Every structure is written in C-alpha cells, then in structure tokens.
C-alpha cells in the first residue's frame, strides 16, 4: 500500500490493521469496478488509489460491515466522475489544438458491424450516470437498495434511474439494429 501517511504498525488505535483488512477485502471489487469504467489499466489504478486514499483520510466515517463495500463504491463513483471530467477537459484541449493544426486529409471510417462492437457503441452513447447504474446492477450485482446507498439517493430514485437507463440502452440497441 502506498499512502500519503505511512501505516505505523505501533499505532495503538488498531487503525492500520483495520484499514489493511478493509483494503484487502475490497481491493479487487473496487479495481474491477474501475477497470470496467476506465479506458486503461493505469487510469483504473489511479481511481483505486484515490478511492483508498480517500478511505484512509476519512477512515472514521467509513461504515462497518457490508456497508463498507457500498461506501467504497460511492467514493469510487465520485473519483471516477472527477476522472471523466479531467479527461473531457483534456479531450477538448486536444480537439482545439487539432482544429488549429493543418489537417493531412480525411481519415477512413471503420465499419462497426460486429454485434459486440455495436453493443459497446450503444452503451458508450449513454450518459455517464446511465452507464454507471447499469454497471452497478448488471456487473457489480448490486441490488436497488445497495445502488441507492452508492449513489446517495432513495431506493425509489435508484429504481427509477435504473429503469430509465435500461430504457435508454434498449433505444440505443434498437437504433443499432438489435431486436430488443
């Protein structure tokens, strides 16, 4: 573990050992979540590091038991949102710089006719919030009440958001020729 503050094993509070146990129990879950939401392993590693750094800094606020996992998913979700905003700023700058540069010529368009590619394309056209809730439900296997805890909303709001995200995904899939 690489943290801003060293883990002092002589700390009488037991905090380092409790943090290490929490980290060990949840690291793979948070890494998997980050890998599914980022484009590179390096970005996922950054998200995981920032998530656990936040956990270390806010250790006394972390709920116990099964709630720990949901709290960490919530932190990872916010870290990812910050990451995506940073990427968008970077992309806008790159686009501006490219538009100011001399273009070499047209770039060939690649055909997207494989079903997996069409599915990925449909999913990528969804808003970040829709993708996030669908991943929490379908990939992470969270229940609606658990999703509500991660997203900081009521179970009813989470249920409505999940339904709307599924509806928008179905619309995008139909647009790409899937029979949904």
Image (cartoon, rainbow, N blue to C red):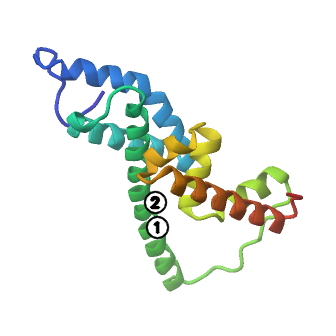
Residue 84, label in figure: 2
In the rendered image, the vertical position of residue 115 relative to residue 52, given as above or below: below
Quadrant in the picture for residue 19: top left
Q: Position of residue 126 (x, y in %)?
A: 63, 63
Please give the residue where the numbered disc 1 appears in the rendered image: 88
Q: Dot 2: within a 10 Å radius of its alpha carbon, few (fewer than 14), some, or many (20 or more) residues?
A: some
Decide if residue 149 is on the left or right side of residue 176: left
In the rendered image, the vertical position of residue 26 relative to residue 112, given as above or below: above
Q: Position of residue 153 (x, y in %)?
A: 44, 54
Decide if residue 18 is on the left or right side of residue 86: left
Q: Position of residue 175 (x, y in %)?
A: 81, 68
Identify the residue shown where x is 37% and y is 32%: 68
Secondary structure under the numbered disc 1 in the rendered image: helix
Identify the residue shown where x is 42% and y is 64%: 85
Decide if residue 33 is on the left or right side of residue 176: left
Secondary structure under the numbered disc 2 in the rendered image: helix
Q: Is residue 34 visible?
A: no
Identify the residue shown where x is 40% and y is 62%: 86
In the rendered image, the vertical position of residue 101 relative to residue 67, given as above or below: below
Quadrant in the picture for residue 6: top left
Q: Dot 1: within a 10 Å radius of its alpha carbon, few (fewer than 14), some, or many (20 or more) residues?
A: few
Q: Is residue 46 visible?
A: yes
Residue 121, label in figure: none
Spatial CA distance of label 2 from label 1 is 6 Å
Q: Are marks 2 and 1 in contact (CB under 8 Å)?
A: yes
Q: Nearest the camera: 54 or 42? A: 54
């Amino acid at each position: 573990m690489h943290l801003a503050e060293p883990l002092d094993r002589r700390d009488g509070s037991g905090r380092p050992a409790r943090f290490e146990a929490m980290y060990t129990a949840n690291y793979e879950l948070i890494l998997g979540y980050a890998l599914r939401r980022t484009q590179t392993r390096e970005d996922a590693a950054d998200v995981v590091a920032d998530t656990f750094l936040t956990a270390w800094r806010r250790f006394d606020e972390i709920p116990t038991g099964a709630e720990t996992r949901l709290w960490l998913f919530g932190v990872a979700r916010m870290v990812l949102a910050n990451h995506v905003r940073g990427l968008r700023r970077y992309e806008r700058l790159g686009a501006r710089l490219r538009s100011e540069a001399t273009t070499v010529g047209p770039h060939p368009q690649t055909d997207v006719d494989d079903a997996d590619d069409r599915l990925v394309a449909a999913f990528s056209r969804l808003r970040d919030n829709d993708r996030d809730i669908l991943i929490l439900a379908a990939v992470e296997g969270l229940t609606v009440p658990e999703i509500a805890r991660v997203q900081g909303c009521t179970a009813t709001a989470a249920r409505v958001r999940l339904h709307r995200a599924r509806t928008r995904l179905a619309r995008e899939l139909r647009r790409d020729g899937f029979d949904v």
